[in-house]
Image (cartoon, rainbow, N blue to C red):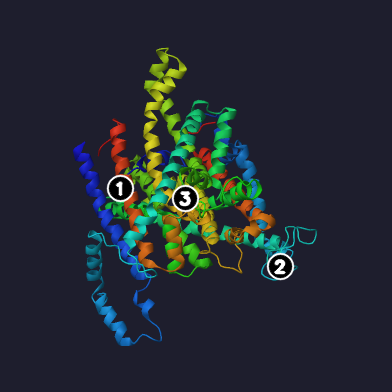
């Protein structure tokens, strides 16, 4: 269908193992060193990586560094930022900074887990469709077309309405809806790899299927999967935020970056309490943008034909 | 060509049937309409009678075929809340959504096509970096956060634009009034779409610029601008078609959130209120409709693709 062109584009990034570079010092450099050297050329991505490390560190250490309990009332209602409350307090007197730290933790958790689930599903389906071909391919790819036809947000909203919204349900819903892109990508790669000599010779040599699939084909599609999954991660974080903003995602009193913005739908909060909604919004933009820049740099760094 | 179109349609048919099955399965999973009836004042016998009247005592596949038969007659079922037919509810909310989606798509293309081509032609220049960075910003800002910022700026601080709705209450409306209400939702939708579109058109254009026929054209010495505007631009039509095809599902999804924020009286707002009321016939009607629209737009894109690009393989 229309995404064929895109698939081809991604599948042009073949093996991670077969690095060919015109540089002379290539012999003294491992593959990972090459990737790291190329990655560092992207200044925006390097900065993004540093920012992301700080954000993830702060989120992981939230129980240690958060000044107050995120769900306990710590001070007066809706107090503007002060020395005591760096980002002020919310409408019922909880500390906004502490909530922001815990919200980042939840949002990152949702994003990472949903991405893991959808990547595993996508890889399994893509591998089977691409390698076995025939009827299996036809059925899996038509099923992928069906899932892709439903607008993503709508499907997630409907699923969230049927299953009660909550942390693990949101993770499962996002994970089970967002796999078609990866399935298509993996299938395209497998179709190319199946025609290579090293895979053909293994088939002729009678190597077990498990070996061919998981030791020969899969390692050679890791690079494009990694690049693609960064964009899935960015989208999952955005979708969790949208879902929670609409009140169908993470439920209060738990904080997520999306549901902290929920309150800004009221005009008082929007006009006179900007400290309640600007910080979580900016946090989403910073995280998603950092992930997107890193993904873009990874695409170049992992490209064996990239040279440079 | 005719054979190719026929083959595409034949592939789309099982997908269409699959979509109706998934849609019906989700609706069954959501719970039976009888739950709405139950209560202290409804007797068990009345529930049983209703069950038979609605055909819910039959096996599930029979129910599916009955539902499908109704669907083919244009009957999408009835809302559990307002008892209106879902078809007429969708029809009355479709106009505003199509208006919003159409204008947003147009604006995003007007931004992303020139920006993507500029970026590709001036690859690695300062302007290129600026465009690409801006496009990353576009795809990283959540639509609802951008909406809040715009409302804060244009409504609260400057007082230029209304914060929601489609027409000013108590007035006749009119095109100028609607346009004024549309500015912010269109900016939000177009901005987020332009983000990914710019990068797609840029990389497609970069590929076109490396083609042999462009080197030949340059070698003939007809001048840089003529090469780009006459030869390359024509071929850039193919990625533009792809972009439009990719944006249709995104638009449907984005409209749900943006219409909610700006209370735009369209399909998205109706769907959101149906979701919070657990009004499943309405929700699934909208899902089915949008899935079919997406399927048809993919089909049309594929066919246009084949028409625009003679080198594409029609396998």
Please state if A237 lies on the left or on the right of B211 as rendered.
right
Q: How many discs mark residues in the rendered view? A: 3
Residue depicted at x 45% and y 14%: B223
Residue A88 at x, y percent in the picture: 73, 60
Residue A112 at x, y percent in the picture: 53, 57
Residue A155 at x, y percent in the picture: 41, 59
Q: Which residue is mark 3?
A: B172
Q: Which residue is mark 1?
A: B296
| Quarter containing the N terminus of chain B | top left
Callouts 3 and 1 on one subunit: yes
Mark 2 belongs to which subunit?
A
Q: Along the polypeptide, which appears first: circle 3 or circle 1?
A: 3
Q: Which residue is mark 2?
A: A93
* Viewer-proximal residue among B30 and A25: B30
Please state if A146 lies on the left or on the right of A235 as rendered.
left
> Residue farthest to the left?
B3
* Distance in Å between CA atoms under marks 3 and 2: 44 Å
Mark 3 belongs to which subunit?
B
Q: Residues within 10 Å of mark 3 (few under 14, many from 20)?
A: few
Residue depicted at x 41% and y 56%: B267
- For mark 1, give the secondary structure: helix
Q: Visible in this render: residue A19?
A: no
* Distance in Å between CA atoms under marks 2 and 1: 51 Å
């Amino acid at each position: 269908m229309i995404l064929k062109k895109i698939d081809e584009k991604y599948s042009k990034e073949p093996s991670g193992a077969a690095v060919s570079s015109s540089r002379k010092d290539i012999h003294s450099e491992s593959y990972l060193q090459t990737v790291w050297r190329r990655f560092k050329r992207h200044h925006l991505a390097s900065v993004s990586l540093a920012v992301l490390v700080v954000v993830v560190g702060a989120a992981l250490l939230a129980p240690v560094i958060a000044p107050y309990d995120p769900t306990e009332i710590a001070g007066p209602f809706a107090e503007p930022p002060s020395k005591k409350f760096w980002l002020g307090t919310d409408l019922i007197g909880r500390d906004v900074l502490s909530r922001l730290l815990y919200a980042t933790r939840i949002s990152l958790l949702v994003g990472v887990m949903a991405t893991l689930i959808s990547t595993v599903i996508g890889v399994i389906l893509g591998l089977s469709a691409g390698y076995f071909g025939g009827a299996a391919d036809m059925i899996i790819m038509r099923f992928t077309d069906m899932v892709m036809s439903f607008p993503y947000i709508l499907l997630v909203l409907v699923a969230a309405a049927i299953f009660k919204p909550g942390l693990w349900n949101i993770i499962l819903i996002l994970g089970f809806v967002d796999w078609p892109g990866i399935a298509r990508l993996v299938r395209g790669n497998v179709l190319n790899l199946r025609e290579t000599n090293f895979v053909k010779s293994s088939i002729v040599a009678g190597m077990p299927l498990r070996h061919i699939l998981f030791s020969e084909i899969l390692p050679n599609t890791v690079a494009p999967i990694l690049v693609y999954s960064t964009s899935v991660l960015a989208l999952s974080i955005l979708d969790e935020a949208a879902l929670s903003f609409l009140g169908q995602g993470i439920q209060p009193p738990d904080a997520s970056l999306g549901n902290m913005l929920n309150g800004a739908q009221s005009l008082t909060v929007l006009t006179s309490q900007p400290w309640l909604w600007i910080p979580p919004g900016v946090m989403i933009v910073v995280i998603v943008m950092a992930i997107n820049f890193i993904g873009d740099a990874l695409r170049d760094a992992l490209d064996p034909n990239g040279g440079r | 060509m005719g054979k190719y179109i026929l083959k595409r349609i034949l592939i789309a048919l099982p997908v269409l049937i699959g979509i109706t099955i998934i849609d019906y399965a989700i609706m069954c999973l959501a719970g039976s309409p009888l739950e709405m009836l139950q209560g202290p004042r409804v007797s068990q016998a009345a529930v049983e009678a209703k069950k038979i009247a609605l055909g819910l005592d039959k096996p599930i596949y029979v129910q599916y075929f009955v539902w499908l038969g109704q669907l083919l007659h244009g009957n999408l079922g009835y809302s559990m809340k307002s008892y209106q037919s879902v078809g007429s509810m969708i029809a009355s909310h479709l106009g505003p959504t199509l208006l919003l989606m159409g204008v947003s798509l147009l604006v995003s293309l007007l931004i992303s096509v020139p920006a993507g081509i500029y970026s590709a032609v001036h690859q690695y220049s300062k302007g290129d970096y600026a465009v690409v960075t801006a496009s990353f910003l576009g795809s990283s800002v959540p639509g609802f956060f951008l909406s809040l910022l715009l409302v804060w700026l244009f409504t609260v601080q400057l007082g230029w634009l209304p914060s929601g709705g489609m027409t000013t209450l108590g007035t006749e409306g009119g095109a100028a009034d609607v346009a004024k209400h549309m500015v912010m939702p269109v900016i939000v939708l177009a901005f987020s779409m332009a983000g990914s579109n710019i990068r797609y058109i840029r990389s497609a254009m970069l590929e076109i610029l490396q083609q042999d026929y462009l080197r030949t054209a340059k070698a003939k010495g007809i001048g840089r601008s003529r090469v780009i505007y006459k030869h390359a631009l024509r071929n850039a039509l193919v990625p533009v078609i792809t972009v439009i095809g990719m944006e249709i599902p995104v638009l449907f999804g984005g409209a749900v959130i943006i219409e909610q924020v700006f209370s735009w009286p369209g399909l998205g707002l109706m769907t959101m209120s149906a979701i919070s009321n657990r009004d499943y016939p309405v929700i699934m009607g909208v899902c089915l409709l949008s899935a079919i629209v997406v399927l048809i737009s993919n089909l049309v894109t594929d066919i246009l693709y084949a028409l625009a690009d003679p080198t594409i393989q029609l396998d």
